[in-house]
Image (cartoon, rainbow, N blue to C red):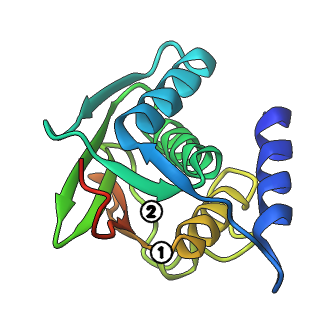
């Protein structure tokens, strides 16, 4: 728990502010997702995560450490709200962008909280930094992140990162 808070605070500090710089390199998306799932699984060995990746090899310009942190945050949120349920990570190309979805079959997010989940300090049982950090990181990569949720049915958090010409594997 403390490690997660420190990682999130350091990441927010790194990207927060007008002079924030994201160091991007072409990264193999499958490796970043696999690394995040492995890191998550070490902390939560009882959690069940199914990963669905595209068959094509794809590299995307990103700060791999920060995107991995986004994935770990989203997996941890899903785990918190499923309590032994199903978590699925799905990645695919759509409309020239790389889309990642983390879906759970947990309790869902209360409708009154849903419009505010990406605000700093808003929490549904966590620290209030994970989703704020995730949004900041994704947007710093010129991407977009959003949530779809139904109470009692689960939540899907999706984000897209642009794929520029010349980056397709």
Q: Quadrant of residue 129?
A: bottom right
Answer with left or right where residue 56 lies relative to residue 166: left
Q: Is residue 152 visible?
A: no
Residue 71 at x, y = what percent?
51, 45
Residue 96 at x, y = what percent?
21, 70
Q: Quadrant of residue 161?
A: bottom left
Disc 1 to disc 2, how far (Cα)? 6 Å
Q: Quadrant of residue 134?
A: bottom right
**What residue is pinned by disc 2?**
109
Q: Could you tell me which residue is drawn at 59 percent across and 15 percent down?
A: 42
Kindly check if marks 1 and 2 are in contact, taking CB atoms under 8 A apart as contact. Answer: yes
- Helix, strand or loop under label 2: loop
Badge 1: how crowded within 10 Å, few (<14), some, or many (20+)?
A: some
Residue 152 at x, y = what percent?
31, 53
**What residue is pinned by disc 1?**
114
Q: Is residue 70 visible?
A: yes
In the image, farthest residue toward the bottom: 18
Answer with left or right where residue 20 lies relative to residue 100: right
Mark count: 2
- Helix, strand or loop under label 1: helix
Q: Could you tell me which residue is drawn at 55 percent across and 75 percent down?
A: 139
| Observer-nearest of 131 and 63 | 63
Checking the image for residue 134, the label placed there is none
Residue 100 at x, y = what percent?
33, 53
For marks 1 and 2 on the same chain, the one whose residue lies earlier in the sequence:
2
**Is the residue 124 above or below the residue 148 in the image?**
above
Answer with left or right where residue 124 lies relative to residue 97: right
Q: Could you tell me which residue is drawn at 63 percent across and 71 percent down?
A: 136
| Observer-nearest of 163 and 73 | 163
In the image, farthest residue toward the front: 166
The quadrant of the rendering that contains the N terminus is: top right
């Amino acid at each position: 728990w403390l490690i997660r808070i420190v990682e999130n605070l350091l990441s927010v500090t790194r990207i927060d502010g007008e002079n924030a710089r994201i160091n991007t390199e072409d990264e193999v998306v499958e490796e970043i997702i696999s690394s995040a799932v492995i890191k998550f699984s070490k902390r939560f060995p009882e959690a069940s995560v199914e990963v669905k990746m595209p068959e094509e090899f794809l590299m995307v310009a990103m700060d791999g450490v920060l995107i991995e942190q986004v994935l770990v945050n989203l997996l941890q949120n899903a785990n918190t709200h499923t309590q032994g349920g199903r978590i699925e990570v799905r990645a695919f190309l759509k409309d020239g962008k790389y889309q990642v979805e983390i879906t759970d079959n947990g309790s869902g997010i209360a409708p009154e909280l849903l419009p505010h989940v990406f605000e700093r300090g808003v929490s549904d049982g966590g620290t209030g930094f994970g989703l704020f950090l995730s949004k900041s990181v994704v947007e710093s990569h010129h991407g977009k992140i959003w949530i779809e949720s139904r109470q009692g049915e689960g939540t899907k958090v999706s984000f897209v990162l642009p794929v520029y010409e010349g980056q397709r594997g």
